[in-house]
Amino acid sequence: METTHDQDAGATLARRFIAKAQGYARPRRCNVEMLVRFGATPVHVSVRDGRVRQAAVITLPLDSWDFGLSADADAWQRFWAPVPAPGWHDIFALSKRGALRIDGNLQPLMANLQFVKDLVALGREDA
Amino acid sequence: MTTPTQHAKQATSVPKPAHIEPIVGRYLHMDVDGQPQRIYFEEAGQGIPLVCLHTAGADGRQYRHMLCDETVTSRFRVIAFDLPWHGKSYPPLGWEQNEYQLTTDRYVAIIMAFCQALDLQAPALIGCSIGGRIVLELANRYSDYFSALIGVEAADHQQPWYDTSWLNRPDVHGGEVCAALVSGLVAPQSPAEYRHETLWQYMQGGPGVFRGDLHFYRVDSDLRGRLGGIRTDLCPLYLLTGEYDFSCSPEDTERTAAGIPGAQVTVMREVGHFPMSENPAQFRRYLLPVLDRIHTDAKA
């Protein structure tokens, strides 16, 4: 069961991610709707033509997205460490150890995998 | 804008000599199971033959730093070849009619054909990833042929972490997805230049080749309980695994080594699944002591 502390940590991480994701762009034709869940705080990210058009906490029910990446606050904090420890440095490392869940329609994710990996790593602190 | 005086100075200045690496690349023709193969290989140095096996979906360029390292090439004839279907080795005749799938027996046959075609005497061999897995099989079958074997990111088995069908399908760019998947296997400390150089090779692989290599890795080479023939007293076996490799983890290598008397394991700090290409400076800290041992043993 998630505590108030965990919820606060998730919300803080979500704010940090949203601030960094705004305006993020790469020169590629990436168009995806993705969910990034920080503990109990879900964030919807819309990408059009390789640019993040919107990144915001989901407040309304029945939000629709292509694929989602979900982890608790502790996992994101480890992933975003300036130099992450072995096994906490990549979304598939987290997935393999059961610390991150990837679900939904994976085709848009796999077709834009490096874009998405770089996007969700934006919260990483400078080394 | 260049002034007339500057132009005159440039015209009379001595040109800086081009930096040319010592690597020499050539093509070798050999048969594997009766099928002609044209194999590209690069080599540099002299001394003990040291055959280098690249990772799945990549090619011999991964060893370019070792091929230019005088500390290595002053004592070893370093030879890196591209597997058929990889790098500058074409697929065999009629490839367009078949789906590429590497098997354990085929992989062994290619390596042995290459060594015999070059008439290598008691070569040492280093292989990474699938090359590390086949090192274990070579140790099992040919302890009396090789003088030493080095398995980098080697284990008898490891748990899959993605569905390989994503590597070759029409609605996902194969090169991009191959590179993006393995990008997480590069350690965060590895220099950006070499990280992206390593990934570029994955972007350049032929369609389905990485996936075909993984047929060997995932389907045809579960070596658990099948390595009883290894004789490290005849052929030393060194296993080097990067701490950031979550595909073939240090635990996978250590578990494998626990079943092989005499196998010597080193966990390498601050490297991932592609040590020789992602961070050559860090890798050589671990590789050179092993090569020193091999060189010393050869003189004894």
Image (cartoon, coloured by chain):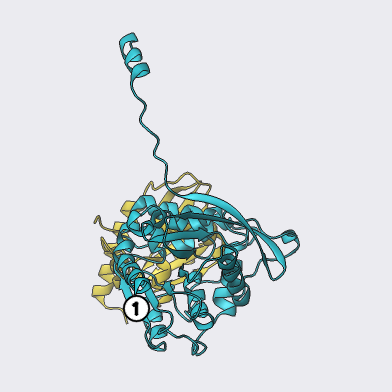
Chain colours: A yellow, B cyan
Label 1 sits on a secondary structure element that is strand
Which image quadrant for residue B188? bottom left
The residue labelled by disc 1 is B265
Between A109 and B98, which is closer to the camera in this rendering? B98
Q: Residue furthest front?
A: B300
Residue found at x 56% / y 71% = B214
Between A124 and B288, which is closer to the camera in this rendering? B288
The quarter of the rendered structure image containing the N terminus of chain B is top left
Dot 1 crowding, Cα within 10 Å, few <14, some 14–19, many 20+: some
Residue found at x 26% / y 68% = A9
Which image quadrant for residue B151? bottom left
Is A9 left, or right, of A61 in this rendering? left
Relative image position of residue B117 (x, y in whole percent): 60, 64
Which image quadrant for residue B97? bottom right
Relative image position of residue A45 (x, y in whole percent): 43, 56
The quarter of the rendered structure image containing the C terminus of chain B is bottom left
Between B20 and B241, which is closer to the camera in this rendering? B20
Query: In the image, what residue type sits under mark 1?
Result: Val
Between B188 and B253, which is closer to the camera in this rendering? B253
